[in-house]
Image (spheres, helix red, strand yellow):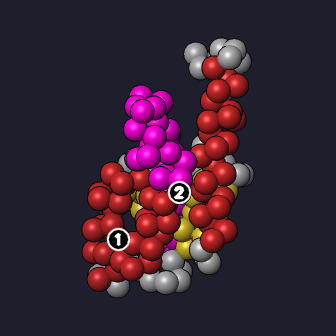
Amino acid sequence: DVNDISKFCLDIIREETSAGRTPNAVVLLCGTNDLKKLIANPLQLRSNSARAFRDRLSRFIRDVRDASSKETTVILPALPTHKIDKQHALNVVPLTFFLDIASSAWDSQKKLVADAYGRSSFLCDKKKPEEQNVNLLRIPPAVYLSLSA
């Protein structure tokens, strides 16, 4: 989830910045685990709601910029539910309807956060960063730091 990604990656971003390699973009691939927490614990709505997810995303963007630069772009890609093909185990009615609704709710939170912060983007294109001819350092589980100028 976003909190786990923050705990793991912010120190790496700080180290890269202090070494003179400030990232010009951070891509945060998130939402699935946050959504699973809501499904697993629906009674803990306050900490697992869409609003709580949006608040965690906002805090992450502020923390990334504090750790690196106010000019660092944060990119929030949509959940890749479009890749579920006809043969996939998750392609079962009514599960597919639920997945579309749930992922849309989370993706709408990403769009709200991206729109609220300058130099932030919500991507619906779902194009992989590796396919965009950018030199990337991949840091598991979910952050890409661009090393290109």
For this view, does 118 lie left or right of residue 57?
right
Are the residues at dot 2 and dot 1 in contact (C-beta closer than 8 Å)? no
Q: Is residue 80 above or below residue 136?
A: above
Where disc 2 sits, the SS reads helix
Residue 37 appears at what percent x and percent y?
A: 42, 36
Residue 8 appears at what percent x and percent y?
A: 29, 57
For this view, does 130 lie left or right of residue 145?
right
Q: Is residue 30 magenta?
A: yes
Where disc 1 sits, the SS reads helix
Residue 86 appears at what percent x and percent y?
A: 71, 18
At label 1, counting other C-alpha atoms closer than 10 Å, the crowd grade (few under 14, some 14-19, many 20 or more) is many
**Residue sitting at 36 percent across and 54 percent down?**
3
Residue type (three-letter) at the residue carrying disc 1 = Ile
Q: Which residue is mark 2?
A: 54
Is residue 15 something one can see in this rendering? yes
38 or 29: nearer the viewer: 38
67 or 103: nearer the viewer: 103
Stretch of the chain drawn in magenta:
24-53
Q: Which residue is mark 1?
A: 13
Q: Is residue 147 above or below residue 45?
A: below
**Which of marks 1 and 2 precedes in the sequence?**
1
Residue 113 appears at what percent x and percent y?
A: 59, 64
Residue type (three-letter) at the residue carrying disc 2 = Arg
**Residue sitting at 45 percent across and 32 percent down?**
42
